[in-house]
Image: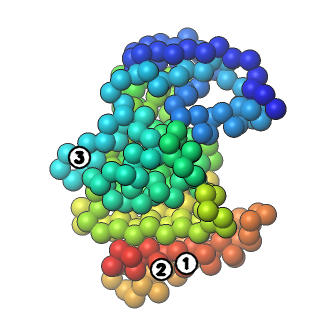
Amino acid sequence: MKCAPFEYVRPTSVDEVLAALVAADGEGKILAGGQSLVPVMALRMARPAVIVDINRVEGLAAVERDGDTVHVGALVRHRTLAEQSAHPLLAEAARHIGHAAIRTRGTAGGSIAHADPAAELPVVAVATGATVTAAGARGDRWVAADDLFAGPLMTTLDADEMITGLDVPVPTRWGFAGFARRHGDFALVTVVVAEVRGQVRIAVGGVGAVPLRARAAEAAIGEPVERVAQLVGDELNPTGDLHGSAEFRRGVAVEMARRALASAGI
């Protein structure tokens, strides 16, 4: 299939992006890497009236470390994340995203805004307690990752807001484990463990409408790894689909949690 007709706008500043979104009156979509948006448009699952291409906007493609936090601009490509050393957990997660072509075009801001609960970066954002900066006509605001994701492919951002970057704390210890049936596929289950500012956080992707915190398991840190991993599975209420039953996903989550916890040395 082909995309439905749309107006194409290519601004060169954040203010111009916001003006275009306001003018679109809820019918605009931001184009960054296009790895998520273009396929759903081609299938006509999305029919935005206006496409706002932000690739000419300067100042959104930097990865910068400030103390124990790394700032990632919205236009930072997955390939850049995979190659940087300022945030090893982000680098590991980015290496698991799709294939080389997707990593070359796809962006950090696009992945977060798309809010696929099986995607790697949203899970890392929740696990590390990242903060997203959203620019809007009423000014900038900062949204915790825990509060950003509202459901599959849904966020709490307004239609006239855009993500300009995210601030991701650097964990002192971390573990990343995901299970996919084929290389390059979305993982059926991803578990990320991160010790941030003295607190161990555990996030699970692919088993719910949004990346989920395993809070009971977090509270049990210090107990044997097998016990903590089992608590991760006990907290989940996944649904079955053509990729596996609910019990299969729960079992995979327990094993991924065990691997992530062991990798983190927790």
Secondary element at tag 3: strand
How many numbered discs? 3
Is 55 above or below relative to 132? above
The local crowd at label 2, few if under 14, some if 14 to 19, many if 20 or more residues have their Cα within 10 Å, is many
Name the residue type under label 2: Arg
Element on which disc 2 rests: helix
Q: Nearer the viewer, mark 3 or mark 1?
A: 3
Which three-letter amino acid code belongs to the residue tagged 1? Val
Of the two numbered discs 3 and 1 on the same chain, state the one appearing first in sequence. 3
Say the numbered circle drawn on residue 258: 2
* Residue at figure coordinates x 61%, y 15% from the top left: 8
Instruction: Give the residue type at disc 3.
Output: Arg
**Left or right side of 200 for 8:** right
**Looking at the picture, how far across and down is residue 90, in whole percent?**
39, 55
| Residue 53: numbered disc | none
Which sits in the foreground, 183 or 218? 183
Q: CA distance from mark 2 to mark 3?
A: 30 Å
